[in-house]
Every structure is written in C-alpha cells, then in structure tokens.
Image (tube, rainbow, N blue to C red):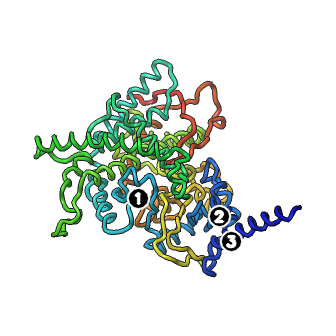
Amino acid sequence: MSFSTLALLLVLFGALCLFRLQNHNKNGRKMPPGPFPLPIIGNLHMIGKLPHQSLHHLAKRYGPIMSVLLGRVPTIVVSSPAAAELFLRTHDAVFSGRPKLQISKYLTYGPKGVVFSEYGPYWRTVRKWFSLHLVSASRVESFAPVRKEELSSLVESLREAETAGETVDLSRKVSKVIEVIMSRVIFGRSMDDQIEFKPLIEEAMNIAGAFNLSDFLPFLAPLDLQGLTRRLKRTSNDLHAFFDKIIDEHEQGTKHEEQKPYTDFVNVLVSLLDTPMNPKDEAQESIIDRKNIKAIMVDMVAASFDTTTTAIEWTLSELLRHPRVMAGLQQELERVVGRNRMVEESDLPKLTCLDMVIKESFRLHPVAPFLIPHESTEDIIVNGYFIPKKSRIMVNTWSMGRDRKVWSDDAEEFFPERFKDGNIDLRGHDFELIPFGSGRRGCPGMQLGLCTMRLIIAQLVHCFDWELPDGMLPDELDMTEKFGLSLPRANHLIAKPTYRILG
C-alpha cells in the first residue's frame, strides 16, 4: 500500500470518527445509539425505498430510541409505544415543534397552515378553529345526509357492476366516493370531471412523502437534484389557483345570500376573512387573509382525501385475505342491522367487531408510516439520552404495530380479536396504537375521518359478498406497499361483488 493511499484512508477514517463522535457524543453527553454515519450524507444511504421498513430493521439492532444523521439533520427514530409516550406525553411540550420543510414553504406559505406551523399562538388559534368550527362533533354529524346520499350511489353502482358480471376496482371506487363526500364537506360541491383536482392532491402527497434532499442537505437545494422543487412549485401554483376560484365562489354566494347558514368548511373560513387572528387583539395586527385560508384548505384536503382512502382499502384487503374475519363481521352486521336495509350511522356504535377490525388494520397499516415529524425546541435528556435542540423526531407507527413485546409473537398476523377487551382506543391516550398521533400535535380531524371510514366499510361488507378475481386464493392477494406521506397499496384492489341485502 502506497503512502498516499494510506494517508487518504486515515483521513477518511478520521472524518468518519468525527461524524460518529458528533452524532453520538454531543459535548460529552450520550446520544441514543445508532448506525455509523458517513460524511456529508450521514445515514441517508440507509433509508431505501421503504424507509419505515429500513428504520424498523435498524431499530431492532439499536433500540426503540435510535439516533441517525440524515444529511445534516440529527434525527431520533422512535419505534416502541413506551418510547413514543416519553416523546409525545411526558415531554410533549419540548417536542411539539415542527421542522421547516420545503413542502410547507410552497404549499402552506411556510407556517400559515396548522400541520406544519410552529408551536405557538398562531398554531393554537388555528387549532381552535378546527376544533370549534370545522371538526366538532355536531358539525361531523351535520354531514350525515351527504355521506348517506353518496354511499347509496356507490352501492347502486356496485349493483350495476354485479348485474353486468363485472369485477370492480375497489380502490378507485372508494377513492371516488371519498373525493365526492369530502369535496361536498370542504368545498360545498362535488368536483366535476372538467376539474383536474384529484391529480393535484395525489402529486402533492407523493412529493410530501418523498425524502427531499433539500430538507437534509440545504446546500444542494439550488440544484434540485430530484426535481421535487420544480414539481412542488407547479403543483402549488395550480392548487392555489383552484382554491382562489373556490373562495371567489363562496364570497359571491355570501354577498348574495348573507342569511344562508354556513354549511361547508370553506364557508366557515370565508366568514373569518379580514377579521383579527386574535379577537382580543385591539390593535388588530394580525388579520386573516387568503393565504391563511388556502394554507388551512391544503391541510384539510391532504388529511381527508388520501389517508381515508388508504385506510379503507387496507382494511378491505385484510378482510378479503381473512374470510373468517369477514364472515364474523357480516354476522354482527346481520344481528345489529338485519338483511332488509342498509347500515345507518346510528348503527355504528353497536358494531364492536367492526371497531376491532379497524383497530387491527390501523395496527398493521397505520394511516401514515411515520407521524408528521416533530422537532425539539430545546436541549433535553430523555431516558438517559441527550437530545439536542432542533433534532427531528420521527415516530415509526408502522414499527410500533409490529413490536412483539407488545403484540406477542403473532404481531405480523391480522387478528382483530386481540382488541376484544376494548381497553385500547384510537384517541392518542394508548400509545400501543396512535395512528392519528397524540398530545398537542394529534390529528384534530380524527372523528370525521373515522366516521366516514367506519360507515363505508360497514356498508360495503353488509351489502355485498366479495370474491377475488380469476379464482385467486386469499393468501395470493398482493399486499405490497407504496411509500408516501400515507402508505397506500402499490396495486389497486380488484374484487367481484354479490349483492346480499334482501329488502
């Protein structure tokens, strides 16, 4: 070996050691264990195409509180319920920050939405809007006629497919009914075929789920090596232009029909235009403008369209793979609802088997494989480990659902009966199952999403028997995942319906 080669190896080894030291021994304080980082890129090379799975396997080696270096961003990966409770309950205030991501810069004008806004007065105000005006129990209930009407149309279209002897693309059918329901709830009207709205949302979700090098290596941002910035700017411009049109329609309607009660979400938001952000602010320094409203609309659409569709199609996939569970759920529906009518929303609280099925589906297929990233607002010691300020916190809910210490050796199996005692709910209090997050940053629209999801699944299972196409056996159904902000099926779910209601 030549002297120059040896010197080069020593320099590289020294650089590696330096990065390792910086990552795991901050000012002499012990950071969580983790894999060896490379210079500049850190551990980005270990992420892979399915980051939730890659980090899950790394956590098996390094533990449920693991430190990785993603480019220049110190990141803590949380992979167990006990660890999640430390970050989202015990030290919730410290970890309620949000990192500044490129996607929020363009889609929600930086901190003007609720999902990516900084923890502080603005976030508290917008969160209160959500809770009081947009997703309260009374408002969720007020949209019951919309859900009933659109589900009746879905059932009728499936009956027509059965009459024609056709198989149906369940993924597409579910996606469409969610789009129509939520468009009416949010915008006050359905989207006609001339408006290319859904592709914009799908593109935004795909970009949001990507590991954007500009977020981890800011000096590379001007190069836009992945082309994400160009896509993001184009999608953002088109989406905001669409929202401007919707706001214009609502403003004109408000002017001509001032006594009309507010029904959809945009109507509520438009009624707040040009009012003080804080009603108690006599100086009125912060006024609600269009940017505020469009940013909130982005959050609402992103949280309701793709995630609910994904959750429903995974649940239906598991039911098709497990005929025993499907039969048990149909028996419960027959007992509670009967065979002479469709499911009503008033039936849902009585369907305990349905709740178990949905919980088990969330355990194996959470709404998002990672919760929206948190960020530490100050230096802190957690479980003996030093977590520096500005560390990114990634809670791997996909990994948590497969923790054998919590779910036993059958953690990979779909077995809804594990929830029979009913002690675990979905509201973020039980850290074994937190698909909607927990604490200050928990999802405020959980109840709206759950109501829609429960009703659609119950209706499809009650009204139809389902058969996989071309003689496919249940265990042959492809369950490959496609990574994004949510975690949809890589391939659409196809099945053949047979109507089973007698009335």
- Give the quadrant of residue 196: top left
Q: Amino acid at mark 2?
A: Lys
Packing grade of label 1 (10 A; few <14, some 14-19, many >=20) is many
Q: Amino acid at mark 1?
A: Phe
What residue does disc 3 label?
Answer: 18
Of the image marks 1 and 3, the number of the one nearer the N terminus: 3
> Would residue 407 be seen by someone viewing this image from the given angle?
yes
> Would residue 59 be seen by someone viewing this image from the given angle?
no
Above or below residue 276? Residue 174 is above
Rendered location of residue 39, percent (x, y): 66, 62
Q: Tag 1, which secondary structure?
A: loop
Rendered location of residue 235, percent (x, y): 41, 42
Of the image marks 2 and 1, the number of the one nearer the N terminus: 1
Q: What is the C-alpha distance between the residues marked 2 and 1?
A: 33 Å
Q: Amino acid at mark 3?
A: Leu
Depth check, mark 2 against mark 1: the one in front is 1
Q: Between residues 214 and 441, which one lies in front from this camera angle?
A: 214
User: Is label 3 in contact with label 2 (beta carbons under 8 Å)?
Assistant: no
Of the image marks 3 and 2, the number of the one nearer the N terminus: 3
What residue does disc 2 label?
Answer: 405
- Give the quadrant of residue 147: top left
Depth check, mark 1 against mark 3: the one in front is 3
Instruction: Kindly identify the residue that appears in the image at 40 percent across and 54 percent down.
Output: 105
Label annotation for residue 56:
none
Q: What is the C-alpha distance between the residues marked 1 and 3?
A: 33 Å
Above or below residue 9? Residue 148 is above
Q: Relative to residue 253, is residue 191 drawn left or right?
A: right
What residue does disc 1 label?
Answer: 116
Question: Where is the C terminus found, in terms of image quarters?
Answer: top left
Q: Relative to residue 377, is residue 57 drawn left or right?
A: right
The number of numbered discs placed on residues in the rendered structure image is 3
